[in-house]
């Protein structure tokens, strides 16, 4: 199944978020704050984008993306 660009980016961001949570759980290391600083504006933006990507992927499980169906 071919994915649109938005779905590819959402999957990548959700994967980064999952990787970050795995690092936090296993090693108590937060990669996002290590790179961008503790709750700086860029870090908040990354967290927001990861959250929106997760929501988008959950919705895509229930209802297929209209752009991917073209």
Image (spheres, rainbow, N blue to C red):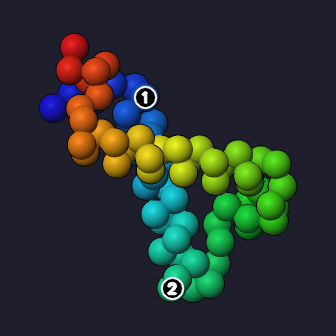
Quarter occupied by the C terminus: top left
Q: Nearer the viewer, residue 40 or 60?
A: 60
Q: CA distance from mark 2 to mark 1?
A: 30 Å
Label 1 neighbour load within 10 Å: few <14, some 14-19, many 20+:
some
On residue 43, which mark appears? none
Q: Which residue is mark 1?
A: 6
Q: Nearer the viewer, residue 24 or 54?
A: 54
Position in image of residue 18 (x %, y %): 46, 63
Question: Of discs 2 and 1, which sits in the foreground?
Answer: 1
Q: Is residue 8 above or below residue 29?
A: above
Left or right of 10 on screen, residue 60: left
Q: Is residue 66 above or below residue 49?
A: above
Q: Which residue is mark 2?
A: 26
Spot the residue most to the top. Answer: 70
- Residue 11 visible? The answer is yes
Q: Residue at x 54, y 51 (%)?
A: 51
Position in image of residue 28 (x %, y %): 62, 84
Examine the image and state in which quarter residue 31 appears: bottom right
Q: Is residue 28 above or below residue 40?
A: below
Q: Residue at x 58, y 78 (%)?
A: 24
Q: Is residue 3 above or below residue 20?
A: above
Q: Residue at x 65, y 72 (%)?
A: 30
Q: Please count the marks in the image.
A: 2
Position in image of residue 48 (x %, y %): 63, 48
Examine the image and state in which quarter residue 33 appears: bottom right
Label 2: which secondary element? helix
Examine the image and state in which quarter residue 2 appears: top left
Position in image of residue 19 (x %, y %): 48, 65
């Amino acid at each position: 199944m071919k994915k649109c660009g938005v779905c590819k980016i959402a999957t990548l961001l959700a994967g980064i978020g999952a990787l970050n949570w795995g690092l936090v759980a296993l090693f108590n290391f937060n990669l996002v704050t290590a790179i961008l600083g503790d709750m700086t504006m860029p870090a908040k933006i990354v967290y927001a984008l990861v959250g929106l990507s997760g929501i988008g992927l959950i919705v895509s499980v229930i209802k297929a993306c209209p752009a991917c169906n073209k």
